[in-house]
Image (tube, rainbow, N blue to C red):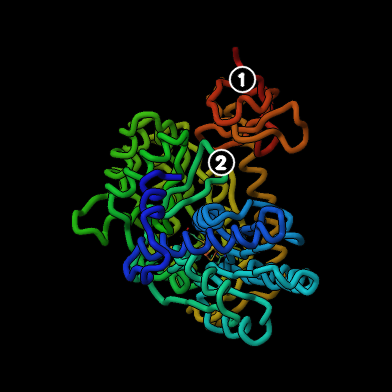
Amino acid sequence: MDTTIENMINSIDLSAPVPEYEPMRQYYYLKACRKIVKEKSEALNRPLTAVVSTFGCQMNARDSEKLLGILKDIGYQESDDEENADFVIYNTCTVRENANLRVYGRLGQLKKVKRANGEMIIAMCGCMMQEPEVVEKIKTSYKFVDIVFGTFNIFKLAELMYMCFTGDEQVIDIWDSTKEVVEELPTSRKYPFKSGVNIMFGCNNFCTYCIVPYVRGREKSREPKEIIREIERLVSDGVKEVMLLGQNVNSYGKTLDDNVTFAELLREIAKIDGLERIRFMTPHPKDLSDELIEAIRDNSKICNHIHLPLQSGSSRLLKLMNRQYTKEHYLELVDKIRNTIPDISITTDIIVGFPGETEEDFEDTLDVVRKAKYDSAYTFIYSKRTGTPAAKMDGQVSEDIVKDRFNRLLATVSEVSHEHIKRYEGMDMDVLVEDIDDHDNTFVTGRMTNNILVHFKGDKELIGSIVNVHLDECKGFYYMGTKND
Ligand code: SAH
Ligand code: SF4
Ligand code: F3S
């Protein structure tokens, strides 16, 4: 725990009125909740446990680390045993309908558990909670949920928990935009050696299929000095790799008074001593600059990987999607990137079955997949999101056709990526070791700078360090290797 935060919390007098301004207000509630949790834990003669469940993207996962930081600070122990936990929070996602359905499925299960354990506190937050009809449904049909909040006020968790501990109403607090950003709060990282870092929040692009701008609000960049300070702290705490997070990192800086570009930010971050790797997600093809490509080329700390979402290879559909680039522009961009940084890895996101997609449009997508030679691609079936322009478009594609196209896309992606990933076979590469291998505990798993996974013989002592590995054999989308001495 940061000693300055701890000192501030210590200085708070709980018998005084609640401070009006942040972050002192949250420090007050952290202290008040610590007291309540301690009393409950003493009464039960065991520590209280909390489960934070993440349903969404990396930004959602970063939010979960902030939630867990608060929960640990007030005295909960982290657990993954949902059935026996004292506090369960679902950090939800609504980007596609199945993300949404998964949440309701799990919530149904949790209802049964709560019947047996009435003391359990259940909270819901994240992107789904920014949809008014979801909150309405929770109010009427899921009354056993104790706390509901959204994406703009996660920093208030301690205050909301205090309200829950001291009242008997469902606590619901949803904001419709960022009113203030409260940064100086505890966080609990999943990995000691790597961390996500928000560089901006929200999105202004309004791709016609996408619900994110509606649930995450307008684009807002964080000040470069705040970002640098956060990364410096992370590095002094053992972090070697950061993932800079934003829905469209290329437009970083546009909302700031000093016009800083994303490439300039990257160059500044790369100067931080002790930081070894920088990743970022997601750049939008429409405004990926030469300056950015050059920054990646010139800086060995910036990883050799660009995730460049295509969505569709058809210029006609890209226009309907409001992506603001064409098939030709995208392919030119890929060429430019590969010509400037020959050993870069390019990955992508693709949607199949956008309204009005014809066989010809789909063939264009397959054509780009073959030409762009992705190392991997996340493929999604189009999901209609109420409130987005695409939901009202004509020509929703039938399920059979979508499934057929989806399978053909998968086959093409794996053929292309397998062929392309093989190019590293026989090379020696640096690998940041992340974990013990799931299948064999005499092996470890790590990532190369291009984000490709490598498994090799090793033990847990290696976790968090960068080691040089010989790539023996490509197994499709990952490698088997041998550690070099
Ligand atoms: N900001 C990022 C994407 C965030 S959402 C970007 O612009 O690339 C992650 C991915 O989910 C998107 O790239 C898209 O492929 C997919 N996605 C978003 N909305 C979707 C929908 N309605 N149906 C299917 N996939 C969708
Ligand atoms: Fe969604 Fe488009 Fe924004 Fe990405 S850029 S979050 S796909 S609206
Ligand atoms: Fe992420 Fe899902 Fe929200 S993809 S931004 S958690 S809708």
Q: Image quadrant of residue 455?
A: top right
Give me the disc on residue 268: none
Q: Is residue 315 visible?
A: no
Q: Does the CB distance between marks 1 and 2 fall below 8 Å? A: no
Mark 1, mark 2: which one is toward the viewer?
Answer: 2
Residue 484: percent from the left, percent from the top? 60, 15
In the picture, measured across the screen, residue 103 lies left or right of residue 344, that is right
Front position in the image: 142 or 221? 142
Instruction: Identify the residue at image location x=77%, y=32%.
Output: 440
Residue 7 vs residue 435, the one in the foreground: 7
Camera-nearest residue between 228 and 237:
237
Kindly state the secondary structure of the residue where label 1 is placed.
strand
- The residue carrying mark 1 is 470
Q: Is residue 469 above or below residue 292?
A: above
Q: In the rendered image of this protein, does residue 322 appear above or below residue 233?
A: below
Q: Which mark is residue 191?
A: 2
Question: Residue sitting at 38 percent across and 65 percent down?
Answer: 25
Residue 466 place in picture, x, y as percent: 53, 26
Q: Earlier in the sequence, mark 1 or mark 2?
A: 2
Which amino acid, by three-letter code, is at mark 2?
Answer: Tyr
- Tell me the distance, in whole angstroms, between the alpha carbons under discs 1 and 2: 25 Å
Tell me the element at label 2. Answer: loop
Q: Can residue 176 be spotted in the picture?
A: yes
Few, some or many C-alpha atoms within 10 Å of disc 1 (few <14, some 14-19, many ≥20)? Answer: many
Q: Position of residue 289 (x, y in %)?
A: 31, 48
Amino acid type, label 1: His
The local crowd at label 2, few if under 14, some if 14 to 19, many if 20 or more residues have their Cα within 10 Å, is some
Is the CB–ligand 1 distance for label 1 below 8 Å? no
- Identify the residue shown where x is 36% and y is 33%: 297
